[in-house]
Amino acid sequence: MNDIKIKARLFTVHDLEAGITITPNTDQAHYLLKVMRVQDSEQVVLFNGRDGEWLSAVRTISKKTCGLEIMEQLRPQIPEPDLWLAFAPLKKSNTDFLVEKATELGVSRLLPVFTENTNTTRVKSERLAAIATEAAEQCDRMSVPEISRVQNLTDLITGWPAGRTLLVPDETGGGQSLKSVLETSIEDRDKKNPHGFLIGPEGGFAASELDALDKLPFVSRVGLGPRILRAETAALAALSCFQAVAGDWQQAPRFNNGYFFNARK
């Protein structure tokens, strides 16, 4: 495929296979028709997190919607890191930023959690899902992370899968460096557990919360260096370290992939 001009890249809930025509949802139709002003036969890339990435062509344009005829598969579905991020919600714009960047960094599930020092009481899951979807469309990943319902810390750790390591960045100096922990995990071939991070609120975890976490066999406190980081910075630093040491950053980027597209923003 050479120099194909793609008008947009969109996530869809529909099954994808050659020869079928799907209808974009209301927001996507508005974006295609009113923002991108697509014309008949122009091309849109689609993905659904299951069937890979597909090329489609715009068909049957009307005033408020259009059809997208599935033409050919561009990429099969590929495995992605099974990496969870539990986090105490921050002020609105900071939470939005965290969700967007965590999606770009390959998180597979986002879990908002209320802690003793959490300074916000409202979490709009639909908004977070929309932010994650647009981030996935823009960064060329093949899936959208799941957004879990908000829960308190006790419920999170009670329901946490015992086979998933929970790494808790701790600014009090109570753990080994994250890089060392991940390198040890890679070297220990008997421990191929999936991982998750728990990022505390502005002001950190309460002492009682740290004590409760320390009693859990699947929890490891980790350090992120000598400086105290903002919560959103800590989350992105931890995810970046994971991807560099134990994730998929060894794979080549795909920015020279033979086509160009306009992503929603």
Image (spheres, helix red, strand yellow):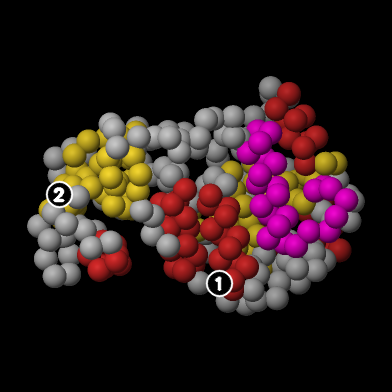
Query: In the rendered view, does 239 fall on the left or right side of 183?
Result: left
In what element is the residue under mark 1? loop
Q: Which residue lies furthest to the front in this view?
A: 3
Q: In which quarter of the image is the C terminus?
A: bottom left
Front-lying residue, 68 or 83: 68
Q: List x then y, in percent, for residue 247.
A: 61, 35
Which residue shows up at 43% across the image and 58% down it? 134
Q: In which quarter of the image is residue 101?
A: bottom right
Query: In the rendered view, does 142 fall on the left or right side of 147?
Result: left
Q: Quadrant of residue 56?
A: top left
Q: List x then y, in percent, for residue 109.
A: 54, 51
Q: How crowded is mark 1: few (under 14 residues within 10 Å), some or many (20 or more)?
A: some
Query: In the rendered view, does 108 fall on the left or right side of 245?
Result: left
The verdict on residue 227 being magenta is yes
Numbered circle sitting on residue 46: none
Residue 15 shows in the view: no
Front-lying residue, 265 or 26: 265
- The part of the chain drawn in magenta is 223-246
Image vertical order of residue 199 relative to residue 244, above or below: below
Which residue shows up at 13% across the image and 54% down it? 40
Q: What residue type is labelled 1?
A: Val
Q: What residue type is labelled 2?
A: Ser
Q: Which secondary structure dominates the residues rendered in magenta?
A: helix
Q: Can you tell which of label 1 and label 2 is closer to the viewer?
A: 2
User: Which residue corresponds to mark 1?
Assistant: 123
How far apart are the alpha carbons under marks 1 and 2? 40 Å
Front-lying residue, 205 or 63: 63
User: Which residue corresponds to mark 2?
Assistant: 41
Front-lying residue, 73 or 218: 73
